[in-house]
Image (cartoon, rainbow, N blue to C red):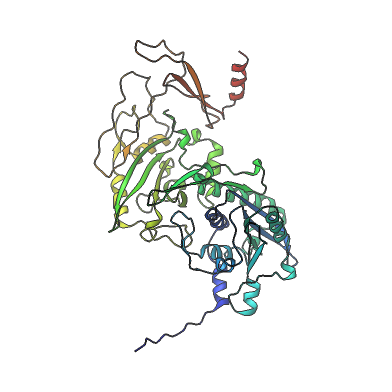
Amino acid sequence: MSEELIPMKGQPIRELQRELQLGYNLEEVVADLVDNSIDAGAENIEIIYNEEEYNDQKSFYVIVLDDGKGISDANISSVMNFGAPREYDELELGKFGVGMKSSSLSQAKEVTLISKVENREINLRRLSSEVILETDRWTLIPTLRPHMNTDAISIAKQKLEERAFGSAVVLEDMHKLKHRVGNEAHKKEYLDKEYAHIKDYLSLVFERYIEGTILTRSDRTTVNRKINLFFNGSSEAHKLEKLDPFCREMEDGTTTGTLSKSTTIDFDDGKVVHKIPLTIWITPKDKDRGKIYDERINQASRFAGISELQGIYVYRNNRLIDFPGWKKILKHDPHMTCLRWEFHFPPSLDEVFQLDPSKREIQLPRQIFDIFGEISRKSYRWHSDDDKSWNHRGRARLRQAGKDKKMSSPSPSPSPSPSPSPSPSPSPLPSPSPSPSPSPSPSPSPGQQPLSEVKIKKLSGSIAGKIFVSEREEGGKLSITLNTQHALYQAFIDAIKNQ
């Protein structure tokens, strides 16, 4: 006896209204489109954000343009369908096949995909609220109506004509933005803030891709990824600079530098034991991080202040997907602004971590939650001059209060080893060499390698900090780190050149 199936009637207009009200922020929408560009092999991705006339009204548009491999005419319609079936490589940032459409409609009533594969003509598909409201059907149109040939469409087409292949997604009739800009007198002020949100959010989320990263599949094969992100222009001046939430470049062995402890968590999903990396970071305090850095990372999170940016930063394929907050591992504490955890999980555990289609949030499985709880209670010697072991909360409070113990002078004796602690607590990284104030290098003792070269490192520190950040000996070289933000930095460099 065959099973009776009762068809369900769709309600396209109601479903469209739901999609238009989804709670994405614009920067999250743009990031979702950048994901698609990266998956298409793009190396250069340009975001264009401007204003145009649409249906006789002023309206904003956003274009995300790339130099990826493009989409053929045979496939372009399926790409615009919700949840179209296809195989995903485990290193791809896309997942469910609904993100681009749902996220885009949450901000724009008109979504147009324009693409070009090598040596072929441009292809176009438009998901139009105007057409859906007329027909009460989910449909795509391959040819634009006359009033749809806007400035944004012309710009996207022209830029694609200039390259051999690539794609552009054009978002128009952006129904939420027009209610947030306010009156004409405050438009520029709003747009400046909006641009800052988008630029710094992308710089944070794709920091590893801007820097250049290596992704590793489960079979241990690797892929190199490096992108250039541009905002409202394609010159070097428009290129976005990476934004590292952990201040890794300030991990220089000084009392003001970044501190960290790393470990690998064993997670058994019932089939395989996964090795999942976790690093606890304690950043420099605010005056040593620098005002510009704090402004940027604060702008990256639209509704969070600098204090709320403590917490767990969750990565998938080296793309930041969930931040900030402690997920009930710890409580928010205004004295722990310096404390951030870095956690990576593989795409094979998407279901375990309940990754949602928006790729904005995960849920910690109970096993990981319990391990995190144990780690949060462990204590360590964070560097060789700590007079006792601290858990990460106490050490972060000490740092934020400006009570770091001053480091001693270099000693030929080895640095004391950290206190051992049972698994799964973090395994301390090797303690950095202490960094004294700059002083003339002593003559080498018998058996010591003589210094033969000076190596100068640059660090974007605090305007109020010291010009000399650290000095140490490394394999016959005297390594000096200078604070480029110091008011006298350039004068110091000029004085050295004139000696």
Front residue of 273 and 456: 273
Q: Quadrant of residue 444?
A: top left
Quadrant for the N terminus, please. Answer: bottom left
291 to 15, vertically: above or below = above
* Horizontal arrangement in the rendering, residue 41 relative to residue 414 (left or right): right
Residue that appears at 55% across and 76% down: 14
Front residue of 471 and 309: 471
Q: Position of residue 457 (x, y in %)?
A: 51, 27
* Horizontal arrangement in the rendering, residue 254 relative to residue 159 (left or right): left
Q: Position of residue 367 (x, y in %)?
A: 29, 55
Mark yes or no: residue 186 visible.
Answer: no
* Horizontal arrangement in the rendering, residue 347 relative to residue 32 (left or right): left
Mark yes or no: residue 102 visible.
Answer: yes
Residue farthest toward the front in the current orientation of the protein: 119
Quadrant for the C terminus, please. Answer: top right
Q: Position of residue 326 (x, y in %)?
A: 39, 50
Residue that appears at 38% across and 57% down: 348
Residue that appears at 30% across and 20% down: 413
